[in-house]
Amino acid sequence: MTLEVTAGPSAGDSAVAVGALLAARNIALIGASDRVAWSSGLYRNLRASPGLGRLWLVNPVSGTAHGEPTVSSVDAIDEDIDLACVVVGAGRVVDVLHAVAGRGIPAAIVIASGFAEAGEEGAERSAAVQDLARAHGLTILGPNTAGMVNVAGGIWPLATMMSPPASTGPLVIAAQSGGVASQLLRLSQARGIGARAVYGVGNELVVSAVDVVRHHLRDDQTRVIALYLEGIRDPQAFADVAVEAAQAGKPLVVMKVGRSARGGEMVMSHTGAMVGDDQVVDVALRQLGVIRVGTLEDLVTTAGLLAHGPALAGLARPGRGSGPGPSRGIAVVSGSGAGCTMAADRAAAAGLELADFAPGTVAALAALLPAGTEVHNPLDATGAVLGDLQLSARAVAAVAADPNVDAVLCQSMISERFGADLEPLMAERARATAEAVAGSAVPVVLETDIATDVSPELHAVLARAGLYVSRGIDQTIDAMSAAAWWAETAPGVRHPGLPPARPPAGPGRAQAVPMMQLESLEFLRRSGVPVLPSVLATDAAAAVAAARSVGYPVAVKVEADGVTHKSDIGGVALGLSGDGQVAAAFERIIAGAAASVDRQAIRGVLVVPMLQRGTELVVSVSDAAPWGTMLTVGLGGIWVELLNDVVHRLLPVTHTDVLAMLHGLRGRSLLTGGRGRKPANLDRVAQAIIAVTAAAAELGPRLHNIEINPLLAGDEQATVLDALILVRDA
Amino acid sequence: MTLEVTAGPSAGDSAVAVGALLAARNIALIGASDRVAWSSGLYRNLRASPGLGRLWLVNPVSGTAHGEPTVSSVDAIDEDIDLACVVVGAGRVVDVLHAVAGRGIPAAIVIASGFAEAGEEGAERSAAVQDLARAHGLTILGPNTAGMVNVAGGIWPLATMMSPPASTGPLVIAAQSGGVASQLLRLSQARGIGARAVYGVGNELVVSAVDVVRHHLRDDQTRVIALYLEGIRDPQAFADVAVEAAQAGKPLVVMKVGRSARGGEMVMSHTGAMVGDDQVVDVALRQLGVIRVGTLEDLVTTAGLLAHGPALAGLARPGRGSGPGPSRGIAVVSGSGAGCTMAADRAAAAGLELADFAPGTVAALAALLPAGTEVHNPLDATGAVLGDLQLSARAVAAVAADPNVDAVLCQSMISERFGADLEPLMAERARATAEAVAGSAVPVVLETDIATDVSPELHAVLARAGLYVSRGIDQTIDAMSAAAWWAETAPGVRHPGLPPARPPAGPGRAQAVPMMQLESLEFLRRSGVPVLPSVLATDAAAAVAAARSVGYPVAVKVEADGVTHKSDIGGVALGLSGDGQVAAAFERIIAGAAASVDRQAIRGVLVVPMLQRGTELVVSVSDAAPWGTMLTVGLGGIWVELLNDVVHRLLPVTHTDVLAMLHGLRGRSLLTGGRGRKPANLDRVAQAIIAVTAAAAELGPRLHNIEINPLLAGDEQATVLDALILVRDA
C-alpha cells in the first residue's frame, strides 16, 4: 500500500499549485463525449456550478456533446482557460496535457486510471506526466480521481453524481480516492457541516494530499482538514505539514486505511509481530498530533465538531490527575433519562469524566426543574423541557456555571422534522439555545441522539441561529474525546526529525543478520547499557572458573553463530549452584548444540550470574522506515507474545517520555509495587532504555533491530540479561 | 438499574394484552388540552393516522381542545372505545383508569411520569395501577412513555413529534424509553427499514418488553425484534422468550444500557472485579442467542439486515476451522478500490474471513472486466461498472458462483440522489441488481459506503425492485458478523434454567463469610475436586513431620480465621527444602500472624507440597443473581488482576463447554504447549472445573463464591493449590 517516494514538481510551491485549481472559473472539458460517463458527470456538475465562467467542450471528432457544440482542440479557443478537465483514456493523456501546457492553461484535472495501477506502461506514463508538469509548471490533480468540488467558489468539476452543496464552511477534505472524496462531501453536507473544498487527489502525481493541507493551513477560512489516506508516500513532507498544523491550531483528522494489509518485511524477532506497518503509522500520527479515526462517519463527525463546535481544551480525562475532592469533567443535559444513560456509558468508554455537580448547582437546578426531578450529572431535565421554551436553556446555563464542569454536552431540543406551522416555535427554541450557548462560561456541544441527516427545514433554522448540532450521541462523544486529546496534544507536538528515506527492504537490500551475543552485549555495554557480566568459556574447566568469578547461582547459555533462539536447541541451563552442575551443563549444551548446528559455529558457552528479583521487560529499537526508528517497551519474558502489553514511540525520546511509556503499560502495577512487591527503580530503567536508544543511534543505517529481553527491572538496578541485535550491511 | 421483580397481571396472557393495543381503532384522548404538550402531540399524530376510526377528546372542564369540542368523560361516549390515551398528571391517573375500566375499554396508554421515579407515593400509585389492571383485565402501556406507533395498522398514538412512517415491514421495536422508541422508528425509517410496530413500554407496570416479544414471536409478519433496555426485571421471563425466539428463528437484537453504572455488591475476591452486573447480563444474553449491540445506529442496522437481508448461516469465521487449502469466506465487490480496502479492514476487525477466489472465478472475472483490472478478493470492479449497466450484476454472479464464497457483500451501484431524468436508469440498475441477487447461489448483501438517510427517490426505486441496501460499510459488516454469529448460535440455545429469584444482597441479607481454608479444601475434595494434599500443623515439629510426609519441597501457609489474603500478613513461605527451613518458617509465620490477628484465630499452618510444573489458572463459581450462577475461568496467579484474561459462562456447563472456554482464553497457548512447554492435560482440567461446579451446586443458596487460585494445569494432572469459599447463611 506504501507508494514509491517521488518528488512532484510542486514541492515547496504547493500553495500556488492548489491555488490554481481553486482560482479556475473558465474551464475546458477535454474528451467531452456522450459515450463517456465521466464526461457526462463533469458536464452536468460544471453546468450546475454557480461560479462557472465559460465552459468549452473539446472533442477532435464529434461536433457535439451533451447537446452542445464542441471545439476540435484547446488551440481553437481564443479566451483564457483556467482549468482543463481531461476525460480521455490513459493512453491519450500525455498528448492532451502537452496541448494543455502548450496553450498556457495553468491547471488540469485528469480522471483516467491506468497509471500507477498499470505496470510498466503506467509507470512510463506517470513519469511523462510528472516531467511535463515540472517543465511547464502545470498543476495537475489526479490522475485516477473523480475530481474536486470548490464549494466556496461554486465550481464543481466532479465526475460522479452529486447534489449541489448546501453550505459553505471551514472544513476541507482531501481523499486518495475520488469516490470517497465525493462521498465525504455528501456525508458532511447531510450532517449539516459546511465545507470549503473537497479534493480527490487520486494518484498524487503532482498535487498530493500534503499539498492540499499546506495550502489550506495558510487559508484563514479553513479550520480543520479531513483526510482519507491509503498510503503516506512522503512521511517527511507529511510530518512537516502535521507539525505546521499543530502549531497553527488547525486539526488534521485522518482515516488511514489498510490496517488489515500484511505489511512489508517483519523484523526477525519477537517484537517483529508487534510492529506492523500500520502500527508504525498509528504511532507516528499520534506523535504528530493527528487525530486518527476508523470510519468515514467518525471522520466527518470529528471534523464537523472541530470545524463548527467550541474549542474543548482542558477537559478532565483519566490519567490527568484531578486529585481528591469532587470530580471535574463534562456535564450532560438531556430531555430523557435514556439519553443520559447512553451518554454516561459512552463517556466512560471514551475516557471522558463526568463532573460532580457542586451543591450550588444542585440547588439551582432543583429550583428550576419540576418537583421530584432527580438532580445529578448526567441531568435528565425531563420531558418538561419540551413544554417550557426557556427551561432547557436555563438548565444549561446553571450547569455551565458549575465550577467542576469543563464542558456541557446538551441534547438539542429542536425537533428534527417539522411542518411549516411549527417553524416559529423551532426558531424560538433555536434562539434560546443560541443565547444559552453564547452566554456559557464553558464550551457547550449540542447533539442529537441518532445520526440521521439534517432535514432541510432544520438546517435552515439552525443556520439562522448560528447553531451546529452534532449527529449521533456515541459519535459525538467520541469526537469530543478526540478533540480533547487534540487540544492537549497539539501544543507539545515536535518534529521527530525523520531520517532521509531509505530504500524499503527487499531483493535489492541486504538481509539483516544477527550479531553474536557476546559481541552484542559488549556493544551495548560500551554504549552505557547496564549489561549483566558474562564470561565466554570454551571448556568445562573455564566455565567453572567463570561461574566462581561471577558468583553462584549462574546460568549457562550456548554461544553459536546463527543461533538466535538458544532454548530451542537445548542451549540454556538455569539456576546452576555448584561446580559439578556447571561442568555437566557445559558438556550437555555443547553436545546438544553440535547435534543441531555446525560444530565450527559453536564458540563456547556464556556464563552469567542468575538474578532472581525484578520484573522482566522487553525493550526493542527497530528500523521503522520510512518513519524513522521505533522504540518499543513492554512486559518481557514469556509474556511478550502472550500479552502484547507494549507501548511504542518514535525516536528521539526523553527520560520523561520513557517514564510515561512505562506508566502506559497495562501491567504497570508490576513495576510500581504493592502486594508484597517492591517498586522497581524506574529512573534506572529509563536510563537503561535511553542507553539502548543511544546504542541504536550508533548503528546508524545498519540498524535493523535491537531487542533486549529481558531487561530485569529490579528495586535497585535495571540489568540487561539477554539481547539480540540484527544489523544490515548498508 | 435492576428493577424490582413484580408480576404484572398479563403474565402468561401477554399475547392478548399486546393484541388489544394493536387492535385499537376508536380512541379516547383523556385529558385533552391545548396546554399539555403530550396532548397536542397525541392529537396531531392520531388525527394524521390513516387507520383511525373515531377520536374523542375528553376533558371534564374545558369545552374544546385542539380546535375540537371535548366530552366531559368517557361515560358520555356511546360507542365502543378500543383505547384510552391518558395524558392527565400522575396524581389523577388511577381515578381516570378506574373510569376507563368501568367503561369497559380494553386498553390504555398512560403517558405521565411520577410512578417508579417518585418514591413512596409513586410506588403506591404503581401498585394501584397494577391492581386495577389485574382486576379488570385492562391492558396498560406505560406509564412514563411517549406511547406507540402501530405502523402496519396505521394508528400512531405517540405523544412526541413524528413524521408519517414511510414503510411497513417485518421489524418490531420496543424500548423502555418513549423518546428512544420514537427515535428508533425515525432512524429505521430513515434507513429504509420497514417496521410493524414500535412500543415505548415505559415503566412496564403491565405490558413489558418481554410481553411485546412474546406477542410478536407468534406473529407471522414479524421477522426480527429490536429492544432498547435499561434493566431486565424478570430474567426468567426474558430467558423464556429468548429461547422461544431462538427456536422460532427470529433474532432479538438488544441495546442494553447502563454499562458504566456501578453494579450492586461486588463479591469479596479477586474475581469479583471481573464480574460486574453488566458482564453477567452480557454473558446471559450471549448464551441466550441474543445479539447485543452498543449504539442505536448498530441496533437499527443489525435489525434491518436481519429483517430485510438474506439469511447468513454458515459464514466462515476464525475458530471454526476451515483447514488447509484455499480460505472460505465472504467476497466483496465494489466499484472502488477504497470501498474494497475499507471492507477488508472492517471484515478483519469483525472476524469475517475473505474467501480466496477459485481459479475459474479469476478467469471468468478477467474476461468480464476491463483489461488490466486486478482480479482478487476484495474485487474492485472499477468505475467501469458505472458505465455498463449489466457489468456489476455479472461480476456479482461470477463471484457468487465461486465454491469458496459463502456470501457476497456488494456496494450498491444505484446513486443515492438523482433527478427525475435519471429515474429510468436507476430503475434499470435496480432491476439488474435484483436479478443478480435472486439468481445467486449464496446470500448477497447490498451496502452503501456511507450511512446517510435513504432519499425518497431512492426509496421508491428500491422498493419497486424489492431491494434492501444497508447503510454504511462498517455498520453493515458488523451487522453481517452479528447475523453470522446468530445463525451459528441460535440452533444450540438451551434454557439455562435460572433459579428462582433471590433477594438482592443488602441490609436484609446475611453477609458472605469465608470458610476456613482447610475446611474449604476438604469440602472440595469430597466433591471430587483434585486438591493438593495438605496437613494442618500446630507446632514446628508437626510441621516438619507433615513436610516429610507430603514430600519436599513444601510450602507453609498460615491457617487463621478471617484471613483471606495470607501473603498480606507474611503468612506464606514457599520452596522450603529441609526440616530446618520448615521449622523456622513455622515460627516466623505464627509470630507474624500474631502481630496482625487475634491469637485465638490462628489455627496453625498448612503444609503442602510444592508443585513446580504447570500453568496457573483461576476458577471461580459465583452467585450471579438474578441470572443464576456464573463460572469464570482464566489465567491465574498474579496474572488474574493484571491480565483479566477470563471467560464466563452461566451454569450448567458440559465438559465440551469448559474445553471451549479454555480455548477461548487469549493465553490458551500457555495450555496448548509449544516453545519447550508440554501441553496441559485439558481433559483433567475440565474434569476438575466440572467438579468445582458440582461443589458449588452442593452449597445451594449458601453459595456466594468459590474461587480456586491457582488450579495448576499440568501435563498429567490438574491440581487445586488454594481455594477460597465464601458462603452466606440463607
Image (cartoon, coloured by chain):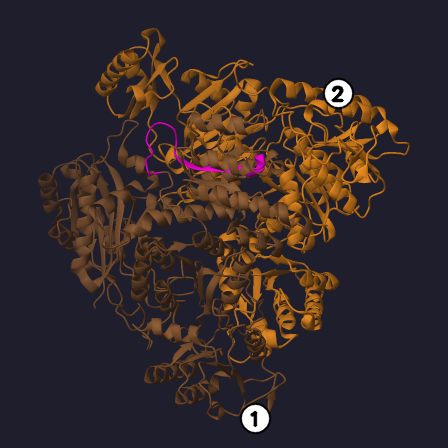
Chain colours: A brown, B orange
Looking at the picture, how far across and down is residue A503, in whole percent?
Answer: 28, 70
Q: Please, is residue B109 above or below residue B665 in the view?
A: above
Q: Please check whether the numbered discs 1 and 2 fall on a single chain.
A: no
Front position in the image: A441 or B219? A441
| Residue occupying image coordinates x 43% and y 89% | A99
What residue span does the magenta drawing correspond to?
Answer: A319-339
Quadrant position of residue B139:
top right
User: Within the magenta stretch, is there residue A327?
Assistant: yes
Q: Residue A581: in sight, yes or no? A: yes
State left or right for residue A371 relative to residue B688: right
Helix, strand or loop for disc 1: loop
Residue underneath mark 2: B131
Front position in the image: B37 or B380? B37
Chain designation of label 2: B
Instruction: Name the kind of residue labelled 1 in the image.
Output: Val
Instruction: Name the kind of residue labelled 2 in the image.
Output: Asp
Q: Please, is residue A703 above or below residue B76 in the view?
A: below
Residue underneath mark 1: A61
| Residue occupying image coordinates x 69% and y 73% | B421
